[in-house]
Every structure is written in C-alpha cells, then in structure tokens.
Image (tube, rainbow, N blue to C red):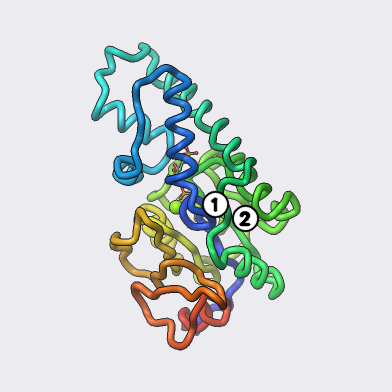
Amino acid sequence: MTAELGALIFDVDGTLADTERDGHRVAFNRAFARAGLPWSWGVERYGKLLAVAGGKERIRHFIDIHEPQSALPHDLEAFIDELHGLKTTYYQELLRSGAIPLRPGVERLLREARDEGLQLAIATTTSRQNVVALLESTLGSDSLGWFTVIAGSDIVAQKKPAPDAYHYALRYLGLHAEQCVAFEDSVNGALAARRARLDTIVTVNGYTRDDRFGETLLVVDQLGEPDSPFEVLRGEAGEARYVTLDLIRRLRR
Ligand code: XBP
Ligand code: MG
C-alpha cells in the first residue's frame, strides 16, 4: 500500500523559478565584468555549463577548460570564492528588484499543500541566503515559515546529483522517502532525488526540455494553472490539466 503523502520537497533553481538564464547567468557576467575579467557566458554556453552543479564548481570547470591558470591569481580557491561572492551579491540584487517571478502553478500548489496540512521543504544546490532572497521577493517574508527545512549547499557535504540535500530534508521532516514527492527541473536534480528514493515530478525549462530524466512520476513543461494547462512530456496525467495534490496522489498509486 502507498504511504500517505506527508510532504512536498522542492528544488529551487529552474523549479520554483526560472533563475538560471536571466538570474544566475546575468549575475555571473556582472561579477566577471566587475573583476575585470574578459569572460561572458552567453545563453547557449551557460546551458552547457549547467551540467556542472554549483556556482563555484561551474567557475572552476570553466577555468579548467578555457583559461590558462597562469593568467589567474595563484590561490585559485580564494579567487573563485571571491568571484562567487560577488556573483551572489549581484544575484540577490536582481531577485530583490523583482526580476524573477515564481513559475506558473508554484504558489498555487504550495498554498494547496499548506491548506491540507502537508509539510513543505526545499532541497537545493544553491545557498540558503539565495533561497531566502527568492522567497522574500516573490511570496513575502512570511513564506519562510511555510517550509519545515531549507536544505542548501551551506549545510550539506555534497551537492546534487548527490542525494545529501534530500537526505537532510527528510531527516528534518521526520518522514520516509515514500511519504514525500520531490519537484525537480534537471537531470542532476532528478538523479539526486532518485538516489534518495523519492518519487519525482519534473517541470522542464528551456535548458532541460530535451533531457532524459530516468524514472519519474511525470514530466511536464510546468505545474500549470487552470487557465494555462501543462504539456505532458512523459507519464500519464489523465484528465488533469495542472498539477494538484489529487493528481500527485493518483500518480503515486
Ligand atoms: C542549481 C545550481 C546552482 C545555481 C547557482 O541548483 O546548480 O549552482 O546554478 O547557484 P538547484 P550558486 O537547481 O539544485 O537549486 O551559484 O549559489 O551555486
Ligand atoms: Mg534545479
């Protein structure tokens, strides 16, 4: 028998909001310019760089491939830390300016889950401070209290595709994986959720539409709203036109 649904666990970047192309990418480029570096990550190049989870890891990967290290400061780790700190400042500025809304259906589903007494959690590769900035700028500061736990890169040992953020969230929720459903947008994220034995619903975005996600409950282009239905890319949603708790429960059976 399927365990009763107790919590929804959300990824952040690409899932709660389309933060990558017009958020993180733009902030990286502002940081590069500020640091006097002749680097600029275009939309397409950034899509390829997204295969590397984590902003600092992404910068290091870029350097490994494109930049002779001799041209950079000797203490590469400190250099990357500083550059990433700068990027985080620009990213949060962007969020606080209201530049990045939540994706369709996210607020509706969060509210439905709260109304039904389900717990909510976040499992992300970005930092808690970035999540706080996103939630405050979209749902208001009270919304921080909606989430039992925000499991971010600052508290777990390994970033996705490792399952650490999900394991941490599950421990905090006091629930088993069978009692929860994860929401992801990327291959690395879906893999992390699966490694934590979670059922997963994937909402793809421009960068991940053609990716293969392995075993999932459903792959859609968005959670959808009554007046703007989702497109089902993989799985069977029956008559449903947008993701609701009722649909999630049916998919889990
Ligand atoms: C996505 C990521 C992050 C962001 C950048 O995380 O891989 O690295 O691209 O954020 P998720 P940072 O989808 O799991 O939330 O620069 O803070 O790493
Ligand atoms: Mg993501």
Residue at 43% x, 87% y is 238
Q: Position of residue 174 (x, y in %)?
A: 62, 61
Specify whether tag 1 is near ligand 1 (CB below 8 Å): no
Work out whether 106 lies above or below 57. below
Residue at 66% x, 57% y is 147
Q: Secondary structure at mark 2?
A: helix
Work out whether 207 lies above or below 24. below
- Please name the residue that numbered disc 1 is placed on: 168
Which disc, if any, is residue 172?
2
Q: Secondary structure at mark 1?
A: helix
Residue at 42% x, 58% y is 185
Q: Nearer the viewer, residue 176 or 114?
A: 114
Q: Is residue 144 left or right of residue 65?
A: right
Q: Nearer the viewer, residue 38 or 58?
A: 38
Q: Residues within 10 Å of mark 1 (few under 14, many from 20)?
A: many
Determine the CA span between mark 2 and mark 1.
6 Å
Work out whether 2 lies above or below 202. below
Q: Position of residue 40 (x, y in %)?
A: 36, 30
Specify whether tag 2 is near ligand 1 (CB below 8 Å): no
Q: Position of residue 251 (x, y in %)?
A: 46, 80
Residue furthest to the bottom: 239
